Image: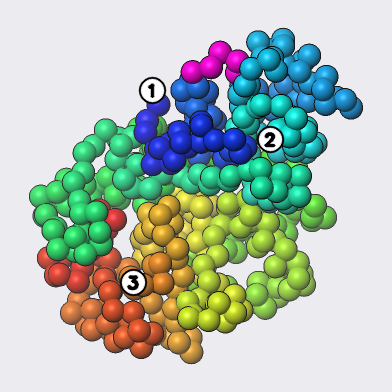
Amino acid sequence: MIYSRQIFQKLELELNTKEATVITGMRRVGKTTALTRLFKLTESENKAILDLENPIHRKVFEEENYDNIWNNLRQYGVNNNTKAYLFLDEAQNLPEISRAVKYLYDHWDVKFFLTGSSSYYLRNLFPESLAGRKVIFEMFPLNFEEFLVFKQIQRKTGQTFSQKARDKNKIAYERLIPYYNEFMEFGGFPSVVLENDPERKRVLLSEIFTSYFEKDAKNLADFRDMSKLRDLILLLISRVGSRLEINKLSNELSVSRETVYNYLSFLEQTYFISLLPKYSASIDRQAAGSRKLFFCDSGIANVLGRISQEQILEQSVFQNLRHHHKLSFYNKDGASEIDFIVDDSMAFEVKMSMSQQDIRNLQKRSEGIHINENYVITLRYSDNVRAILVTDI
């Protein structure tokens, strides 16, 4: 059974476009499932789906004369007499594929769909060879709304944040909060969500991390000492939801600041972490500020180390907001932080339980940066009009 993902509707529109469609994201987030779904929706019979982890499938494109690729594709029922549709999974396994894709794209009527587990690879390999010829879509682990779809649980909530704050329902909250607790603990990787046994969930999460480290990290990165990258990941666990201090990380790892920056850049571009910028009306100042750390998934964070419930709550809210919103954070002189600035127009504070003082503090801080719409996202139920229940995000 293929469960619906929010990105599917956007991807379906790509079936009728010329540009190559690139789906990128971390391993096990569902890229292959999405590719298979698009393949089945393609009405043409002149199509093939190839897994570039398979050396036989890679050999199709390993030709000095790219015209010969069509001879190889005929073995899979594809020809160049009519429009062809090629679905290529795990493109990072064949770095030369971008040149072949460009040639076939420019000379024949062919529509490409490609997946890859790393923007580190895709963004650095494809810009020149496929400039103006590709559209990139990012896939992430499930957010809570998608999590409920996989659990076959219905939820009704407002479309806008103001509606979510206004139209709360305690019965719905009580029904959904056990599922949100599971979402916080085990995250949103599809295979983990579909597994019912908690211990098995932890095994799957450990395997996802091992696969990431052994395949993406070791194969894509050009780092001399992989143990330092591993040690950095473990150091980052306790810093979820916090601003990173590069000097401290550099000292603890006994490496240069530049090395730390290189590691962080790699982790971010392979979707293992996200680094939120500090909010500023000035783009230049935003880029220069220290950044706030989140992991790809709360389940991965939990399986790698011990972090507080407050940190996991904020991590889970980040996972719910990142799909559809531009995110940053705000702090002034190391204090008075606002957890999330959403689309440069709303301010969110995340609390286990909220008080009237939390609302006053958030309103005061928001006014200081000229943001009028603000809410406290709370794990525990509150009927306050400035509160949004975490189960409704």
**What x and y, as percent, mark residue 138?**
53, 47
Question: Mark 3 or mark 2, which is nearer the start of the sequence?
Answer: 2
Give the color scheme: rainbow, by chain, secondary structure or one colour. rainbow
Mark nearer the viewer, 2 or 1: 2
Residue under the image location 53 percent in, 81 percent down: 282
Q: Name the residue under label 1.
A: 1
Of callouts 3 and 1, the N-terminal one: 1
Q: Position of residue 264 (x, y in %)?
A: 65, 62
Q: Position of residue 285 (x, y in %)?
A: 57, 82
Q: In this view, does 177 lie above or below 162?
A: above
Decide: is 186 above or below 355: above
The quadrant of the rendering that contains the N terminus is top left
The disc placed on residue 91 is 2
Q: Where is residue 261 in the image (x, y as percent from the top left)?
A: 70, 67
Q: Left or right of 143: which side holds 85?
A: right
Quarter-wise, where is residue 25 in the image? top right
